[in-house]
Image (tube, rainbow, N blue to C red):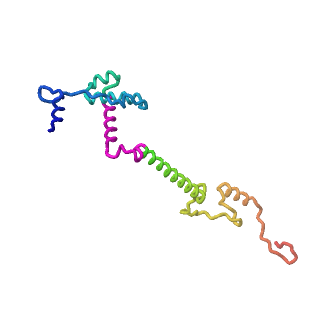
């Protein structure tokens, strides 16, 4: 050890067991003095730092802040995760966009892609409707056993009532003898 290092160690107060005493760390001035920070975020940051540094206990802090113990631990977890993300090598560089900006860019690209796909699907639907006939589709699997009506046939079969009435009129009609044509046009009987 160098002599200046020994002098610095000797100047530090020590406990009876040979360890250095803990000294209080001042709150960073930029947190207290910076005006563009949100006031609630600043208070939460100071609250978490005071607990993590051992300045205050969790019970004291939650009583002062008027929040539940679970809320405090949720805030502390979020703060530590944000600190870890910020301290990843290369995360603090101002050369590229932040992760939030990257995410916004990714989502904007996804929206453009989805709009294009929607437009394509709508166009395919329109073309399909133009090509396909509207209405109920006709099936050609079954053939009809009925013959189509023609002008030379008398139509459908007679009903039972029609057949009875025909028999009655035929029975009441006077019987005529078949006629034989004669050369002068008279009917021969």
Q: Considering depth in this image, is 114 or 15 the residue closer to the camera?
A: 15
- 125 up-or-down from 48: above or below: below
Q: Quadrant of the C terminus?
A: bottom right
Q: Quadrant of the N terminus?
A: top left
**Image location (x, y in percent) of residue 53:** 26, 29
Residue that appears at 32% across and 38% down:
83
**Image location (x, y in percent) of residue 103:** 42, 45
Q: Considering depth in this image, is 58 or 149 the residue closer to the camera?
A: 58
- 148 up-or-down from 16: above or below: below
- 48 up-or-down from 187: above or below: above
Q: Considering depth in this image, is 47 or 33 the residue closer to the camera?
A: 33
**Image location (x, y in percent) of residue 146:** 60, 63
The residue range painted magenta reads 72-100
Q: Where on the picture, by quarter, is residue 151?
A: bottom right
Q: Residue furthest front?
A: 3
Q: Where on the picture, by quarter, is residue 150?
A: bottom right
Q: Where on the picture, by quarter, is residue 20?
A: top left
- 99 up-or-down from 47: above or below: below
Q: Considering depth in this image, is 173 or 101 the residue closer to the camera?
A: 101
Q: Residue furthest bottom?
A: 183
**Image location (x, y in percent) of residue 180:** 80, 74
Residue that appears at 30% across and 26% down:
69
Q: Can residue 145 be found in the magenta stretch?
A: no
Q: Residue furthest left?
A: 17
Residue that appears at 60% across and 58% down:
130
Tell how many labels: 0
Residue that appears at 17% across and 26% down:
13
């Amino acid at each position: 050890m160098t002599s200046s290092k020994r002098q610095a160690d000797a100047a530090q107060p020590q406990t009876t067991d040979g360890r250095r005493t803990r000294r209080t760390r001042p709150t960073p001035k930029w947190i207290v003095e910076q005006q563009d920070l949100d006031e609630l975020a600043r208070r939460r940051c100071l609250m978490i730092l005071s607990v993590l540094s051992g300045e205050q206990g969790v019970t004291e802090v939650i009583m002062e802040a008027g929040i539940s113990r679970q809320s405090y631990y949720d805030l502390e977890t979020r703060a530590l995760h944000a600190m870890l993300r910020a301290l990843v090598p290369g995360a603090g560089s101002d050369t590229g966009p932040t992760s939030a900006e990257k995410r916004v860019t990714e989502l904007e690209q996804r929206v453009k892609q989805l709009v294009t796909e929607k437009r394509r699907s709508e166009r395919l639907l329109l073309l399909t409707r133009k090509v396909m006939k509207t209405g109920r589709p006709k099936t050609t699997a079954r053939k009809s056993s009925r013959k189509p009506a023609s002008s030379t046939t008398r139509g459908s079969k007679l009903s039972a009532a029609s057949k009875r009435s025909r028999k009655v009129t035929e029975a009441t009609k006077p019987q005529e003898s078949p006629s034989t044509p004669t050369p002068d046009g008279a009917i021969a009987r």
